[in-house]
Structures are given as C-alpha cells and as structure tokens.
C-alpha cells in the first residue's frame, strides 16, 4: 500500500562507473546500504521502534544475506509502501541472471519520525546494471508522509538533508559518480583558470543532465548565500555548485567575460557580482530568449529568505531540485520497479515461446497443405492420428502460455504498462492478438483433422458395409440399412423407422434417391456448407425433392396426430415433424421420411421411413 500524501525530501539518479575493471561495485553499494540500515535500526532500537528489536530471535546474520540477495521481508509479507505506525519496516528484492548474478536490486525502508509519531520517513534505493562497462544506475528517493488516520494541522516541514549513504557513495574512491556525462562534485568548486575550462565544457554540453549552480561573490568576497558549503551539501547529487570570486580580475577578463560576451545573446546568460544562477540542462548561448529558463537571484533577495539559523533560500532550492526530478521508464527506484522488471522479463520469455509456437503452427499448416493422402487407408489414418496428437500438444502448450500470461502479477504488469506507456500496452495487445489468431488456426486445423478422421471412419464403415452386402438392396428396409451403414457418421435410424420401412412398398428408385440424399445433401445443408438460407429451398435445388419443416396448423392442433411425430432418442423425447416428400400423390403410396437434427452429435436421426403419417387431411379422407 502506497501513501498518497508523500512529500519528496531528496531525489537523485547516479551513474556509477567502477574505477578498476573487475571490481564488484554492485555488492559494495548494497553493503553500504546494509551498514546504513543497521545504523538506523540501532538508533531506532534505543526507543523500541526498530523492526529487528521486535524480532528477538532474529540475528544480524539472518538479516545480512537476505538483505544483500534481495529477499528480505521485515516483517513477513512487507513489500514496500506504508509500514506499521511507530515501528520500522524493510524489504529488498532482486533479479538475478542465469548465472545467479544480481542484475537489479531495490531496498525500501519505512521508519517513524523521532519527534512526530504520525510522520514516517520512506527511503527507496534502486540499483541496476547497465549493458556496458560494468556501469550501474543508482536511484535514491527519500520521502515523508503522515500515517493514515492522522487528523490535525500538518507538522513543520523538516529541514533539507542529504542522506549519509549518498555522501559515502559519492565520496568513495572505488568508482566515479556521474549524472549523465557530468561527474558529481563532492563539494563546492572554487573556480580558477584551470577549473573554469571544466565548468565551461559542462555548461555547454548538449547532453548534460545535471543542473549547475554558479555563485558569485561581492567585492568583499561574500557569497550570495551565507554558506556555499551548506548549499553544496544539501543539493549534493542534485546539482554541482561552483563559486566565482568576483575580485579575481584576471579570471573575469580571461574566462567569464569572453564566455558571456557583451553585445551578444550569450551576455544574457551571465552572472553578475553577488548573484546566484542556476543553469538547467540545455544551455544555448546563441539563443538569448531562452536565458530566462536559467534563473538568477541577487544576494539581497537571498538574504531576505533567511530566518534564524535556517537559510530559507537553500531550503527552497534543495526542495525545488528534488521536486523537479522525472523518473525514467527504465529506472529501478523501489521494489515495485523490480517486480515490473521481472514481469517484463517474463513477458519476453512468453513472447519467445509464443513465437516458437507460431513457427511450429506455420510449419504444421504448410505440411498439412502439401500433404497428399496415402492410397493405403491405414497409413492415412495413422498420419491423421499423428497430426491430431501433435495439434493436441500444441493446444496444451498454448493453454499453458495463456495461463502464464494470466498469472502475471497484476500490480507489476500494470507498472510495466505504465513504465513503457502506450508502446508496451500495444505490444501486450499484439501478443494477445497473436495468441488468439494462433488459437484460431489451431482450432481450424484441429477441426479439419477431426473432420478427415471422421470421414475416414465413415469410409471404413462404408467399405465394411459394401463388403458385407449379400445382395443388391431389394427392399426399403435394405436401402435404409445400407444408407445407415455407409454413412453411419451422418445418419442414424430409430427402430420405429425400420418398422415403418417394413410396412411400406413403393418406388425403390425414389426411396434410394431420397435416403441417399440425406447424408449427401441434407447433412451438408445443416452441418457442412456454412451457407445460410431457406433449408427447404436449398434441399429442393440440391436433391430435387420437396422438404417441409413442419405440419399444417390443423394437423398441429390435433394432439393425437402430433403424438405420432414424437420419438425417444438418447434419453429424451424428440420431435420429427421435418419430413421429405416422395412424388406419389396417393396417401397410400406417398413416401415420407421424417427426421430430427441432432446438432450436438451432428447426425440426421430418421424417426419414420415409409407411408404418409396421419394428418388432418388424410384423417378426413379415411
């Protein structure tokens, strides 16, 4: 849980470049953070507010290794954000590569204020490796906030400070600390002719990211701020501070005046006696109008901001620099960023697996299209079975991939999307679209394979039916049995259909034409073509016979007649009103086939095959 009333106290981002090849700056910095954490806990323990003091059975060694490895949770399940009021909370998270080497590490520490019980301080430190030269990126963010439930006037604003661990990291000889291409100064720099060249290059660098503060003295040597060292310390890592002695005539004439030459646009960027100017990144001395972005302040105005032993201007400048900070989308600042990085890496792995599955699907599709059916039926069936098993495995892998996507931590996934903004969101959507498209192709191939296997089974049964044929069908019952045997995957006849066939004698050729049209034309109309339109008309055009989907109103109004059109099939009662009509006009010679459509099994169920069932018209004739 994150507080919504956090105020930035200190914010900086550093590039760490090791002084010696092979030096493990990453671990050295995490050790510095461990020492700082232990020192803070030692102070908190004196007033019973430290987390380790609350866990008496937890030794320092039990804290050290999880802290450095990125797996610390104090108390258990704490994963950053708001801690428990009046006590400290801490956690670290890390990401390792395939060799087990930490690539990213984050530390969050929440502690109570020593004077304001409801105010807590929150320290977030993130460390990540760059791709080249063993360089590291270090992010530091210090905030304070009021705990939920506090009611009252806001307490006084705490004075600006630079964390001790930041000073230790900047002052270390094991590496150099930069912001962009600008080396961070450990203290204010008093300019001379040698140092002014470095200042000039840094000032005019188009890639500079670190603000520069130039302070000039008056003719008595007093700086624009009371204490330049205090200013440099409070903005350490957020700006480099330079001091120019206005009494140095040689330095003015050889360095300062030529840089800000009078009569040119550059003159508007100058810094007069007893002033302070802040040079933001992107100084273009040829563009005089842009000089207003680099604000300057006179000594008399700065002096007015002092109250008691506090230099109000220094406080204002320090807070302004920390608040003006923008976080890069690749930054590791807190544990949520580590979770985001994990999510990004997992998504990359999933994308790689998805691409592999896609290529396999493409190969399977190409193989399917180029496949020529074998003459040997058993060989073809074996091929189809192997194809089906292969596609089933593909389906299972796609399902696992989809589950892996859905199991991504929602908060970290959202943070990843925020961090990469619209670009990542589009990539994620593309991945989902590709999964959906590939799933559709799998289903399509699976359907084709199942259809062919079903046709093969039907063909085998047809062959068996032909081989088992003792004589040419000479009766309607023979024709019905033959049709049901050859096309058993499309047509099934109920016992009532066979009984009605035994009692009817008509035109055997017409009976064959109608019954054989059921698996060939009628079944295709219902299940095979995918076309839409009037079923009766489409059947008439395909088979040449009339088809009625229902009965007349008078017939439907007669319950006893309608009972003749009910059958029992697969444990339920079905309606066989749809029927195909032979061409015989006499009710006694009129051939009728009544059927039911089993859409689940994709079967045409013949419930009556024989003479004209009773209708309101035939009832009157009789």
Image (cartoon, helix red, strand yellow):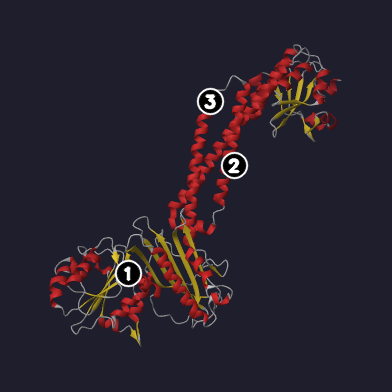
Report the residue marked by disc 2.
Answer: 396
Q: Sequence-wise, which precedes: disc 1 or disc 3?
A: 1
Query: Is 299 left or right of 249, judged from the image as shown?
Result: right
Identity of the residue drawn at 47% across and 77% down: 40
> Would you say residue 460 is visible in this rendering?
yes
Tell how many labels: 3
Identity of the residue drawn at 28% across and 60% down: 207
> Would you say residue 533 is visible in this rendering?
no
The relative height of residue 14 versus residue 539 in the rendered view (above or below) is below
Q: Closer to the camera, 249 or 586?
A: 249
Q: Position of residue 202 (x, y in %)?
A: 24, 65
Could you tell me which secondary element the residue under label 2 belongs to?
helix
The relative height of residue 377 versus residue 266 in the rendered view (above or below) is above
Residue 576, by quadrant, is top right
Few, some or many residues within 10 Å of mark 1 (<14, 14–19, 20+): few
Question: How far apart in space, not on screen, are marks 1 and 2 (Cα)?
Answer: 56 Å
Report the residue marked by disc 1.
Answer: 173
Q: Which mark is residue 371?
A: 3
The relative height of residue 202 versus residue 619 in the rendered view (above or below) is below
Could you tell me which secondary element the residue under label 3 belongs to?
loop
Could you tell me which secondary element the residue under label 1 belongs to?
loop
Query: Is 489 left or right of 86, judged from the image as shown?
Result: right
- Cβ–Cβ below 8 Å for labels 3 and 2? no
The relative height of residue 28 versus residue 532 in the rendered view (above or below) is below
Q: Nearer the viewer, mark 1 or mark 3?
A: 1
Q: Which mark is residue 19?
A: none
Identity of the residue drawn at 29% across and 65% down: 182
Q: Closer to the camera, 255 or 218?
A: 255
Q: Sequence-wise, which precedes: disc 1 or disc 2?
A: 1
Quadrant of the image containing the C terminus: top right
């Amino acid at each position: 849980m994150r507080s919504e009333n956090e105020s930035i106290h200190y914010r900086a981002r550093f590039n760490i470049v090791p002084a010696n090849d092979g030096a493990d700056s990453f671990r050295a910095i995490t050790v510095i953070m461990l020492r700082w954490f232990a020192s803070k806990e030692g102070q908190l323990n004196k007033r019973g507010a430290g987390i380790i003091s609350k866990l008496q059975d937890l030794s320092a060694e039990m804290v050290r290794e999880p802290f450095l490895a990125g797996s610390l949770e104090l108390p258990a399940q704490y994963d950053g954000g708001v801690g428990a009021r009046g006590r400290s909370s801490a956690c670290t998270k890390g990401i390792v590569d395939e060799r087990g080497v930490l690539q990213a590490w984050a530390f969050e520490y929440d502690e109570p204020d020593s004077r304001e019980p409801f105010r807590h301080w929150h320290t977030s430190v993130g460390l990540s490796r760059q791709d080249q030269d063993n360089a590291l990126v270090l992010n530091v963010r210090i905030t304070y906030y009021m705990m939920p439930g506090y009611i009252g006037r806001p307490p006084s604003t705490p004075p600006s400070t630079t964390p001790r661990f930041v000073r230790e990291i900047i002052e270390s000889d094991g590496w150099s600390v930069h912001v962009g291409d600008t080396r961070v100064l450990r203290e204010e720099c008093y300019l001379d002719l040698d140092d002014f060249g470095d200042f000039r290059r840094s000032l005019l660098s188009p890639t500079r990211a670190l603000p520069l503060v130039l302070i000039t003295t008056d003719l008595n040597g007093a700086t624009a701020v009371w204490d330049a060292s205090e200013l440099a310390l409070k903005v350490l890592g957020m700006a480099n501070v330079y001091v120019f002695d206005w009494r140095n005539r040689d330095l003015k004439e050889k360095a300062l005046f030529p840089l800000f030459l009078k009569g040119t646009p550059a003159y508007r960027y100058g810094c007069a006696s007893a002033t302070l100017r802040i040079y933001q990144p992107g100084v273009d001395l040829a563009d005089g109008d842009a000089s207003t972005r680099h604000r300057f302040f006179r000594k008399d105005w700065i002096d007015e901001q002092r109250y008691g032993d506090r230099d109000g201007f220094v406080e204002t400048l320090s807070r302004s620099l920390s608040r003006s900070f923008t976080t890069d989308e690749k930054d590791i600042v807190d544990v949520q960023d580590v979770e985001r990085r994990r999510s990004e890496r997992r998504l990359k792995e999933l994308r790689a697996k998805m691409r592999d599955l896609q290529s396999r699907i493409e190969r399977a599709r190409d193989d399917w299209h180029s496949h020529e059916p074998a003459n040997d039926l058993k060989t073809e069936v074996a091929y189809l079975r192997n194809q089906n098993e292969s596609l089933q495995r593909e389906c299972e892998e796609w399902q696992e991939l989809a589950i892996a996507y859905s199991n991504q931590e929602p908060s970290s996934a959202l943070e990843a999307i925020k961090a990469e903004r619209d670009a990542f969101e589009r990539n994620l959507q593309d991945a989902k679209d590709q999964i959906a498209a590939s799933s559709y192709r799998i289903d399509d191939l699976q359907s084709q394979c199942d259809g062919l296997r079903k046709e093969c089974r039907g063909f085998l049964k047809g062959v068996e039916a032909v081989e088992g044929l003792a004589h040419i069908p000479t009766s309607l019952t023979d024709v019905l049995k033959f049709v049901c045997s050859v096309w058993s995957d499309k047509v099934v006849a109920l016992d009532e259909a066979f009984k009605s066939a035994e009692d009817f004698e008509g035109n055997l050729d017409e009976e064959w034409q109608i019954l054989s049209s059921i698996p060939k034309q009628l079944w295709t109309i219902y299940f095979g073509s995918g076309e839409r339109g009037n079923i009766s008309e489409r059947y008439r055009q395909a088979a040449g016979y009339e088809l009625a989907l229902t009965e007349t109103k008078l017939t439907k109004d007669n319950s006893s007649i309608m009972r003749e059109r009910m059958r029992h099939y697969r444990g339920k009662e079905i309606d066989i009103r749809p029927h195909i009509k032979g061409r015989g006009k006499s009710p006694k010679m009129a051939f009728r086939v009544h059927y039911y459509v089993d859409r689940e099994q994709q079967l045409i169920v013949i419930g009556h095959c024989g003479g004209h069932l009773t209708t309101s018209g035939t009832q009157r004739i009789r």
